Amino acid sequence: MTAAIPGRQRRYRRGMALDFDRRRLLTWSATGLAAGALARVPAAGAATERATTLISALGRDATQFGIRPGSPDDQTRLLQRAIDECARTAIPLALPPGVYRSGPLTLPDNAQVIGVRGATKIAFTGGAWLMASEGAGNLALTGLVLDGSGLPLPAGRGLVHCQFGRTVRIEDCEIVETGGGAIWFENVSGHVRSTQFRNIGRTAIVSFDAKGLLIAQNTILGANSNGIEILRHVIGDDGTIVTDNRIETIKAGPGGSGQYGNAINAFRAGNVIVRGNRIRDCDFSAVRGNSSSNIQITGNSVVDVRECALFSEFSFEAAIIAHNTVDGAGVGISVANFNEGGRLAVVQGNIIRNLKRELPPADGPDAEGGTGIFVEADSSVTGNVIENAPTFGIGVGWGPYLRDVAVSGNVIRKAFIGIGVSVVQGAGSAMIDNNVISETPRGAVVGLDHARPVTPDLTRNGAEKFAQVVLGTNQVR
């Protein structure tokens, strides 16, 4: 692994005195000015004029500092002066529509830069970053197109690079054509919302050691390392929420055996919630939790990933993987690495289908996909539906690495083996009960030595019994 919201609530009380401090008065005045400006500008053929009038009403017009939209000149010095001056008075810097060429800019406390969505572009002219801050709080970037111009960035840097930031907000922006990462956060609280990422040279969003981060309703279309990385330098609580994003076409450009090519990757980060994301076309996983305890992976829609779609692995305790759909993957869900301490999971209510034997070459020549769900220790697998699994519908245990697994209430159709369960010496207990299993030519329930079938169908009359495997009433046909 590389070292790499709530809505506002307003309360009104009759007769309550209002404290008109300077900032609130400016904000309310800007809102009124904007409304008036829009009313005065003719609608037909005046989109640019209307946008410029509105943006000027909501902040201090950048042209007052000599900044010129569309100028062929590098405007880094003028932009930095404007950002610093507006930040000192906590007033947004408003950039009218147009292209602004700039090198590295520094964001101090209270820096807020706003533009017209899709029309205000800052084009990167080179350097270690485009916008950066260290230890600054109350930062906001809104309505900007940040164009990396395909220029390279140093390792461990993003086009937007923030360290030790409090309430950093990036919203309604576009970050495109980067020669490295798009956003790199370290020890940051805040949110990234409703922002589009396109053609990202490494990872779209990297967060190390978050202090309370929301990543929501973004669109990532093409990244060469990962879509989103939630990382910590040591195992610990993180609590980042990753919800309602659309992530597509994630490549494992740097190679590796699973470090790259994932839509969402959590590493050493505890209590992360990954919910309601739409994920398609990844070289490796849709969601990969590595040494991330108490991870929740729920309600995601996954299509066409080349390795394991939903993964909880290595040194973790507790994972909930529930109510997801997976259509097209090497493996649907894997809860693995009991040998490293990985244990304790609920896998419930997922629909998994159209699995493939082929796995990425990086997994090795002997690696084989085609399994719907795989679990090892202290886990419940209930209420899932699995169809078209060319290897196992459900795999339970890996050699001696099996302990206390319940498999019940699942529907498995068209799998080579319905449920494979480890029966080697040293394997722990498994209960397999109340499942519906059909069209499994090698058997409904079969004993395994690692991945190798070593028994006939254990549901047949007269089949060998194993003390650690409890077979209840399963419907087999």
Image (cartoon, rainbow, N blue to C red):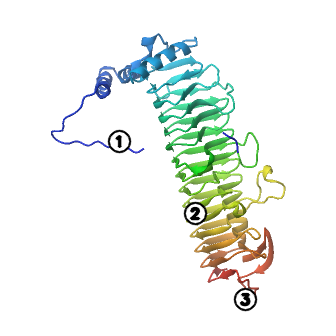
- In-image side of 471 versus 273 (left or right): right
CA separation, marks 3 and 1? 64 Å
Say if mark 3 contacts mark 1, CB within 8 Å: no
Helix, strand or loop at label 3? It is loop
Q: Is residue 69 above or below residue 150?
A: above
Toward the viewer: 398 or 389?
A: 398
In the rendered image, which residue does mark 3 sit on? Answer: 461
Residue at the image position 76 percent from the left and 75 percent from the top = 426
Badge number at residue 392: none
Amino acid at the residue labelled 3: Asn
Q: Is residue 37 above or below residue 172?
A: above
Amino acid at the residue labelled 1: Arg
Toward the viewer: 83 or 476?
A: 83
CA separation, marks 3 and 2? 31 Å
- In-image side of 367 versus 372 (left or right): right
Residue at the image position 77 percent from the left and 51 percent from the top = 360
In the rendered image, which residue does mark 2 sit on? Answer: 350
